[in-house]
Image (cartoon, rainbow, N blue to C red):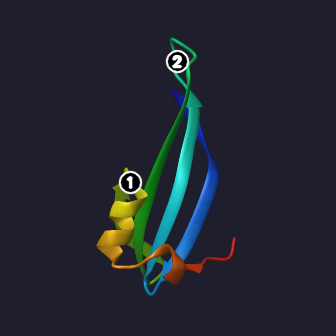
Amino acid sequence: MRSAILELEAGALGEHALVFSVLHGHARQSGVEVAMPCAHVARWREGLCDYLKVYMHREDALEDMDVTEETLKPLAP
């Protein structure tokens, strides 16, 4: 499957960043379109990412970070 991130949202949580994305692509053999939402939590120290966790469900990432969508501060592009 070839894919590209077409949808992206990001929020700042102190030294962490919480990114929501939807990967879109087409299955290599069948050509079926697929879309897979996921969330990423990254921690940055001294300009380097030293922690990254990927979640299949947006709600799980929010719960692990102990935040709600309303409390997230959007990151500038």
Q: Establish if 25 lies above or below 62.
A: above
Q: Relative to 74, is 65 on the left or the right?
A: left
Residue 57 numbered mark, or none: 1
Between 41 and 32, the one lying in front of the other is: 32
Q: Residue 28: which numbered mark, if any?
A: 2
Is 10 displayed left or right of 60 in the figure?
Answer: right
Please give the name of the residue rendered at 47% of the width and 70% of the height, measured from the top-left corner.
18
Mark 1–mark 2 CB contact (< 8 Å): no
- Residue 11 in the figure: left or right of residue 42: right
Query: Element at badge 2?
Result: loop
Image coordinates for residue 49, horizontal then vertical, percent: 42, 71
Residue displayed at 54% across by 43% down: 23
Crowd rating for badge 2 (residues with CA inside 10 Å; few <14, some 14–19, many 20+): few
Mark 1 or 2: in front is 1
Residue 61 x/y as whole percent? 36, 65
Instruction: Give the class, few, some or many, for how many residues have Cα within 10 Å of label 1's Cα (few <14, many ≥20).
Output: some
Visible in this render: residue 27? Answer: yes
Looking at the rendered structure, which numbered label has been put on residue 75? Answer: none
Q: Earlier in the sequence, mark 1 or mark 2?
A: 2
The residue at the far right in this view is: 77
Q: Disc 1 and disc 2: Cα gap in Å?
A: 25 Å
Q: Nearer the viewer, residue 49 or 71?
A: 71
Give x and y (percent) for residue 60. 33, 62
Q: Amino acid at mark 1?
A: His
Residue drawn 42% across and 59% down?
58
Q: Amino acid at mark 2?
A: Arg
